[in-house]
Image (spheres, rainbow, N blue to C red):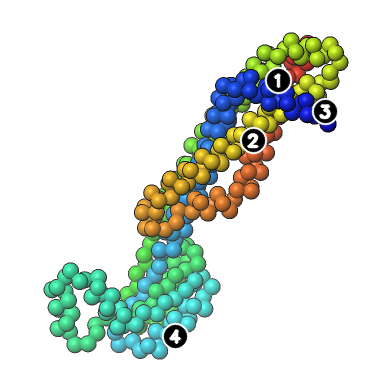
Amino acid sequence: MITLWRIFIASWKNLTRNAWIAIATIFVFMMALLSVNILLGVNAMLERVVTLLENKVDMTVAFEPATSEAIVNQARFYLTSLPQVSSVRFVTAAEVLTAFKIRHADDPKGLAALDELNGNPLGAQLVIKAKQSDDYPFLAQAVQSPQYKPFIQKQTYDDHQVAIARVREVSRSVRLIGAALVAIFSLFGLLIAFNAIRVAIYTQREEISIMRLVGASSSFIRGPFILEGLWLAMLTLVFSAIAIGLIIIWLEPSLRPLLDGEDSGLAAFFVGQWPLILLIEGGSLIGLTTVISWLAVGKYIRR
């Protein structure tokens, strides 16, 4: 226990002696981690945008005004039975007329012409949502069944496939650019950490030599420097987590108007995935600093 305590105290002394180098190392490691997490956050937000776009896709089937409600309900039950269909909403002819008047409230001539007609010239509608956006072409053919085709006035397909494809293309580009940034910052972090530990060891080379002369073991000499690397990694993780939290708090209100008031999904992603992110990023960073410390101190131990 005394030996472990001495190693612990020595590691913090080494850290405070080289405070500016430690700060620079933490900063570069933070840049590497932030670039990784920004990439993860952007990907999560792009996936959220794709989901929101897919939720807005639907198909509207308008029936002839003279079509009975029984026929429309029969078509609704038929479509609901299809495995590709998520939901089918029945809109009565009266509701369609009311919605039409609201949409054309600034068109008095159109409303006046509508009032001159006898009765409701609009028929009932079915609003169909598919489970997958790729299922709409199939549903467009399915609704044209010979049993219902004579009663269908028109059908419209609100297609967002082009926007979805563009978002996915941007997502792929972001992954490539993000991977390059991560590699660059990781390389810089590796070099700075290696040099920081080498400088710390170089300033104590005489102490290491004396420790070797009095019979100190290699593990006892390496211990403080390995712990120093561990403290650097842990401080980096803490400061990175604080920075990510502040960035999310700052960004969320700005992103909501761009998504029509919808949640961007950033906070939910990091809250839900933080154990896995901590395990991967923290384990990689701690393992990296441990290996660097072990290799850097070996040169002076062998002298």
- Residue at point 64%, 39% (across, down): 282
Q: Is residue 198 left or right of residue 65?
A: right
Q: Residue at the location (43% across, 79% down)? A: 145
Pick the front one: 301 or 110: 301
Query: Crowding at label 1, few (<14), some or many (≥20) Cα neighbours within 10 Å?
Result: many
Q: Quadrant of the N terminus?
A: top right
Secondary element at tag 4: helix
User: What amino acid is found at the position of numbered circle 3 in the picture?
Assistant: Ile
* Structural distance between the alpha carbons of marks 3 and 1: 25 Å
Q: Are marks 3 and 1 in contact (CB under 8 Å)?
A: no
Residue 10 percent location from the top left of the image: 73, 23
Q: Earlier in the sequence, mark 3 or mark 2?
A: 3
Q: Amino acid at mark 1?
A: Ala
Circle 2: residue type? Met
| Residue holding disc 3 | 2
Q: Earlier in the sequence, mark 3 or mark 1?
A: 3
Q: CA distance from mark 4 to mark 3?
A: 83 Å
- Residue 66: horizontal and vertical position, in percent? 30, 87
Q: Nearer the viewer, mark 3 or mark 1?
A: 3
Q: Taking 263 as reference, is 194 above or below it? A: above
Residue 204 in the image: state x and y as whole percent. Answer: 70, 14
Point out the frontmost of discs 3 and 2: 3
Q: Are marks 1 and 4 in contact (CB under 8 Å)?
A: no
Foreground pick, 274 / 23: 23
* Residue linked to disc 2: 234
User: Cβ–Cβ below 8 Å for labels 3 and 2?
Assistant: no
Instruction: Decide if residue 274 is on the left or right side of residue 80.
Output: right
Q: Is residue 299 left or right of residue 242?
A: right
Disc 1 versus disc 4: distance between alpha carbons?
Answer: 77 Å
The CA span between labels 1 and 2 is 20 Å
Q: Which mark is residue 296?
A: 1
Which residue matches tag 4? 74
